[in-house]
Amino acid sequence: MSHAPSEAPELRPATDDDIPAMVGLIRAAFAEYEGRLDPPSSAQNKTVEATRAELADGGAFVVTCGGELAGCVFYHPHAGHMYLDRLSVLPAYRGLRLSRRLIAAVEDLARASGLDRVRLSVRLALAGNRAYYERLGYAFHAYGTHAGYPEPTYVTLEKAL
């Protein structure tokens, strides 16, 4: 169940000061997948150091509601596309379209950076998540396989901007 924020959500670039809260947010947002994914999500092992490295490899946006960090998304520029990674929204703030705002921020940044595509990956076990991205215009690009697995474990989706 979501609740309405006391003030309008604010979207902004993440800073180093956000990192500890982002770690907690990611762990909380991905907790529902514990025991459902093989291989397990790395989200529960997220550390401040790993998050700082991810931020340095591109960047992230955060959205706050009433001063509380409610969601975040990472992005990584690559040749020809922007990679959208680790979209996370706290369960209490779902249903407020915060994910769409975070995704749109990455898409806008890609355009501003001269990139005409955004890619992201979704576990095959999370068909609902894949369907959500497909409703936003993302389409199949390639299957991927985690190390040590004989069959694909995720799909990469792409949106032409």
Image (spheres, grey):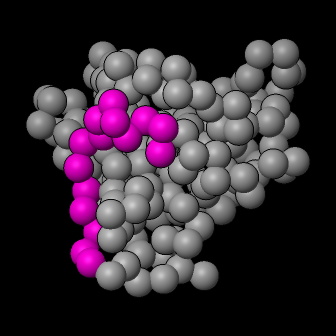
What is the x, y in percent for residue 138?
44, 50
What is the x, y in percent for residue 12?
23, 49
What is the x, y in percent for residue 24?
57, 46
Residue at the spot 81% in from the left edge and 43% down from the top edge: 37
Say whether residue 95 is left or right of residue 32.
left
Say whether residue 5 is left or right of residue 13.
right
Quadrant of residue 111 within the rendered picture: top left
Quadrant of residue 106 within the rendered picture: top left
**Is 16 inside the magenta-drawn segment?**
yes
Above or below, 90 against 20 in this view is: below
**Is 148 inside the magenta-drawn segment?**
no
Quarter of the figure that contains the N terminus: bottom right
Write down the region rendered in magenta.
7-21
Q: Is residue 143 visible?
A: no
Q: Nearer the viewer, residue 102 or 129?
A: 102
What is the x, y in percent for residue 134?
49, 57
Quadrant of residue 77 within the rendered picture: top left
Quarter of the figure that contains the C terminus: top left
Above or below, 59 against 13 in this view is: above
